[in-house]
Image (cartoon, coloured by chain):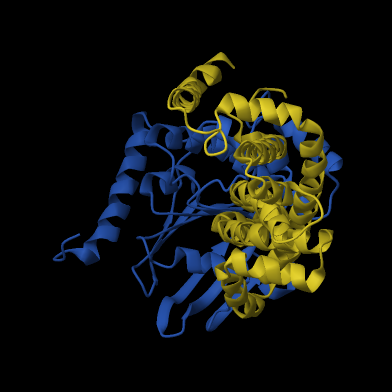
Amino acid sequence: MLTQFYRGLPALFALALLLVSWEAYAQLSGISPTTLPAPSRVLEQAWQNRQPLWDNTLPTIRATVFGSACSLTVAFLLSVLVDFYRPVRRALFPIFIISQTLPLVAIAPLIVLWFGFGLAPKIMLVALVTFFPILVALTQGYESTEAEIEQLLASMGAPRWKRFLLARLPSALPYFFAGLRISMTYAVVGAIFAEYAGAAKGLGIYILNAKNNFRPDLVLAAVLVSAVLTLALFGLTVFVQRLVMPWTRPSLGAGT
Amino acid sequence: MIPPRLQLTGIAAGYKDLQVLKDISLTVRPGEFVSILGPSGAGKSTLFRLFTGTLKPTHGEILYDGLPLEAASSPFAFMPQRDALMPWRRIIDNATLGLEVQGMSRREARTRVEPLLSEFGLSGFEQQYPAALSGGMRQRAALLRTVVQNRSMLLLDEPFGALDALTRAGMHRFVEAMWMRRRWTAMLVTHDVREAVHLSDRIYVLSPRPATLIQVIDIPLTRPRLRNGAAGAEAAAIENAILETLLAPQEGQLP
């Protein structure tokens, strides 16, 4: 625990240095707070506007959670399908790859245009940006299964689906979590982008309004909230991974 | 008369244009420990693929307990080259894997395996994950997983090839002691001459591809086979003779 704290020290120090320099520059250069607000002002304004900020954070959380849940479900089902039927993989993967090349700037307004200002287009955009890393990680993970383990199961008379459950799925877990961590860093950004393109409420629309009102301090306050959200999601995936994969913990504790 | 457990007559097999096995005949009787010894690439793995049914012979016949092999439903318990323990299963759950695949409940499988843990030197480690165990212990766990399946014959595919020399020698003694107690019918595939001489009742020596039998050697040494005294000298003489046979055809070529 303590060693982990010590290992985090350089990062904390660098962050503190950055904030202090920023604060010093904003205070001493006489730059207008409507151009570059000091971190202290951002925090103060974030606290003063905590109610509207929170009201706008909730829809973003909702879009992120539902979007990620959808993309997780679809990615898992597709990965299984693709693992059992190779031709499906050859048919679908090019489409998925093309879907990742679409510029979000163009796609987000279109999806809002087609599906309105409600939750649905946000969920779709979050799913669009998070789905592919998870799918790739899962299919890659299945392929990483040790050939000898599969041979062994075959020699025991295990049918294909049993080999999948007993060997391929657990083998894919480390890959899955690596992909999930990447996806989760996209998820909040994806939701905010969707709101930016059109929404009644949400961090994205809050940022847009703050910018139009020349309030960079509130823009940064919303950015701070979104960063905290992403970090929380990231932490959650690490926590779940430790729960689901106890054998990778450094202390393979006896009798636990 | 009891038919041999496993009998191969004039087996030939291969892949497309590549003939791997050419005219292999061998016999394993119940309770015998038989080794297949040959250079790398001599088709030892192909032989195992014939047994597990993933490959069909182009010629010849395989009888199991006097019946064509197809009739018996997977009579072999297989131990692969590396231990192939699942890193995400505790040792006890790795050991029960075969039973679970056969449809036994996890609890029932555990009660079957638990009494054997101490015999395999694994008691106290059953709740550990494989990563926490030494190479020798992992191999013993893999062997336990193989024998609890209660199949009538063991197929051991170079199971000690990845171990260091000392651990391997320890495993030879362990396997011999277990075999003397339980009289498994076993076939070991290896390219380690000393291992084959230590463990086998009979050794079939294969030529390089396409493989034929170049020698069949009965090992009459008493068990347990120790490395010292007259028995040790006799074992060493047999080892040398086999090495000569294996290396002879390659003379004139650089290894």
What's the colour of chain B in the image?
A: blue
Rendered residue at 61%/38% (across/down): A220
- Number of numbered labels in the structure image: 0
Closer to us: B40 or A17:
A17
Q: Is residue B83 above or below residue B119?
A: below
Q: Is residue A148 above or below residue B229?
A: below
- Residue B232, percent across and down? 36, 35
Instruction: Report whether A38 appears left or right of B88.
Output: left
Closer to us: B112 or A8:
A8
- Residue B179, percent across and down? 60, 41
Closer to us: B149 or A125:
A125
Q: Residue furthest top?
A: A2
Q: Is residue B197 above or below residue A220?
A: below
- Residue A149, percent across and down? 60, 54
Instruction: Report whether B247 appears left or right of B18.
Output: left
What's the colour of chain A in the image?
A: yellow
Residue B115 seen: yes
- Residue B91, percent across and down? 67, 36
